[in-house]
Amino acid sequence: MNRSRFLGLFQSGFGLLAITPSLFIACKETEFVAPELSEAELAYLDLKNKTKETGFHLEGKTLSIDLTHEKYSQLQTVGEFVNDLEHYILILRKSVEEIVANSNCCPHLGTINQWSYDGSKFRCGNHGNSYGTSGLNGFSGCSSGRNSGQLKQYPTERNKDIVTIDLSS
């Protein structure tokens, strides 16, 4: 190798060495910072994780269900309901935005497992009595002997595909 070629290679290599530290410093200064999540997002992710296996999470008298879990997936369709025998509630997708939860205990004689829904009322298949779904106040109590009226309704809140039901009332 002749001297001028050697000096040319040496100078270009030295030039790269001279700018390399500034490249590393520039990379350090542009580290990725994850965006902070809101309390609502953190609560949603926590419930999503807690409902992952069974589709629900019960904490005290607060029931959270995941609409994407196979156990509750039919609630993605308006007019469909789930009779949740484990928690004694009828969960109804009343509209795109509204999901209601009612007691599944028939006011007539207390049957919990024979319900159908006609688009406006639940009908108990035991004796054919029908009951409305807006019973936050003035509902017919379980096994009260009433042949009509409103089923007890529980307050619900929705965060994306997680529905939280307050069973304390």
Image: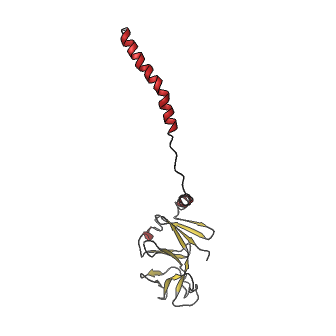
- Determine whether, in the image, residue 2 is placed left or right of residue 22: left
Q: Quadrant of the N terminus?
A: top left
| Residue shown at 47% from the left, 23% from the top | 18
- Height in image: 58 above or below 23? below
Near-viewer residue (25 or 76): 25
Q: Quadrant of the C terminus?
A: bottom right
* Whole-percent x, y for residue 16 in the image: 44, 24
Toward which corner of the image does residue 7 lie, by quadrant?
top left
- Determine whether, in the image, residue 61 is placed left or right of residue 120: right
Near-viewer residue (130 or 11): 11
- Height in image: 2 above or below 96? above
Specify the farthest residue to the top: 2
**Count of labels shown?**
0
* Whole-percent x, y for residue 124 in the image: 48, 84
Q: Looking at the image, what colour scheme do you see? A: secondary structure
- Height in image: 107 above or below 41? below
Near-viewer residue (165 or 16): 16
| Residue shown at 47% from the left, 27% from the top | 20
- Height in image: 7 above or below 49? above
| Residue shown at 36% from the left, 12% from the top | 5
* Whole-percent x, y for residue 118 in the image: 42, 82
Toward which corner of the image does residue 89 lie, by quadrant?
bottom right
Specify the farthest residue to the right: 60
* Whole-percent x, y for residue 146 in the image: 55, 90
